[in-house]
Amino acid sequence: MRLNWGMIGGGEGSQIGPAHRIAAGMDGLFTFAAGALDADPARGKDFAQRLGVSADRAYGNWQDMLEGERNRPDRIELVTVATPNATHYPIAKAFLQAGFHVLVEKPMTVTVEDAEDLVRTAKAANRICAVNYGYTGYALVRHMKAMVARGDIGKVRLVVAEFAHGHHADAADADNPRVRWRYDPAQAGVSAQFADCGIHALHMASFVIGQEADKLQADFASCLPVRTLEDDAMVNLRFSGGTVGRLWTSSVAIGRQHGLTLQVFGETGGLRWAQEQPNQLHYMPLGKRLQIIERGEGNLSPEADRASRVTVGHAEGMPEAFANIYRDLADTITAQNAGKTPDPAANLFPKAEDGLRSIAAIHAAVTSAAAGGAWTDARPPMFR
């Protein structure tokens, strides 16, 4: 049975909206039933209806959507929040308190205090608050995690994460509204590039190695001097299991397209995965030849098999990775509704606690960079 799903933000021309709508519909588990898609009420209503949402569920703003959905017998069960960063917290909290499950775009909030409050709110409401670190939905990222967990590369010594692109490098494009808001503290919060892309790389590193960031040391730069917030960052990390972390993120790296890569080096082997070649995982066992693991081939982990939809040799990409997050959520919500225990393999979606740790890392990195790269505690206060 399909679950009703709604979306806030992600309107016409949005960068992220189409990916969510494709992902939510890919496995036939959700019906796009309600939306408040644009800051302009008329434009948002019109676009929602063109996407197939009925007129009475095409809302002008999120407050109207909350009131309109709250008491419907066919109300939405999951709402995706894909609005500018500073609005995530009030929207997510209101829907959680009203008994809806929520998927929030990253960063989950702009302050640590708000992130901790969302963790507590979700727990009190017994609702899911997930965060869209969607790249962890890739089949081979999940296989990478399984390989680390079963000891294929031994104890992890070093993890190197990158998320560097060059799409904000043109100074003439600085006033483009789709670019400008990312460097505006009033809309983006205390960080730009690290909060936008760097925390994807950090979360993926934590997800794969099964460790959390304990402390960090950061250097921020605004390579375009007109920007208040950083467009390049280098961060050193120490993880809870003793692993050393290196992370570089940039939006001015001309020639880099997407740039999300992860390398994990253990005592007996190394792994490398890149989002631009997501169907291959490079595995180098100590003293042996390089192996290239293909998505969809035989004898992969159950986590990788569950996350694959098409046979080996056919490309899968970002919408399919996002769709795995939606599938995890659908399976978990359906099991919860039936009073059953969800499939453990559906428990890989990023949770509010992951979002909180990311916000704490953002603020720690800002503090560290301002202090000339001083080592700073990266843990949220509630987890210390």
Image: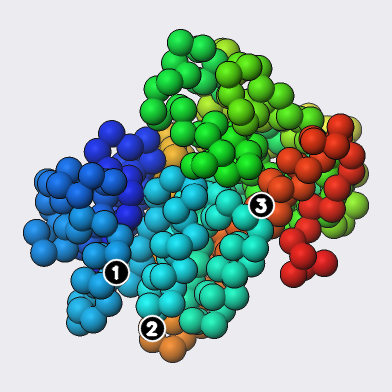
Residue 320 percent coordinates (x, y): 41, 46
Say which mark, if any, is on residue 358.
3
Image location (x, y in percent) of residue 87: 44, 53
When asked about the image quadrant of residue 117, the answer is: bottom right
Q: Amino acid at mark 1?
A: Leu
Residue at (21% x, 71% y) in the render: 68
Q: Which amino acid type is shown beneath numbered disc 2?
A: Asn
Q: Could you say whether the residue bearing mark 1 is in a helix, strand or loop?
A: helix
Which circle's residue, 2 or 3, is located before the other in the chain?
2
Q: State the residue position of label 2.
A: 337
Residue receiving disc 1: 66
Mark nearer the N terminus (3 vs 1) = 1
Given residues 347 and 167, the one toward you in this image is: 167
Count residues near mark 3 (Cα–Cα under 10 Å), then give few for <14, some for 14-19, many for 20+. Answer: many
Q: Decide which of 3, 302 is in the foreground and name it.
A: 3
Comparing marks 2 and 1, which lies closer to the viewer? 1
CA distance separating discs 2 and 1: 21 Å
Residue depicted at x 38% and y 41%: 16
Circle count: 3
- Left or right: where does residue 51 sit relative to residue 315? left
| SS at mark 3 in the image | helix
- Which quarter of the image is occupied by the N terminus? bottom left
Examine the rendered structure and indicate whether residue 378 appears above or below residue 129: above
* Structural distance between the alpha carbons of marks 3 and 1: 27 Å
* Side of 80 relative to 216 (left or right): left
- Label 2: few (<14), some (14–19) or many (≥20) C-alpha neighbours in 10 Å: few
Residue 38 in sight from this viewpoint: yes
Q: Amino acid at mark 3?
A: Ser
Whether residue 183 sits left or right of residue 291 in the image: it is left
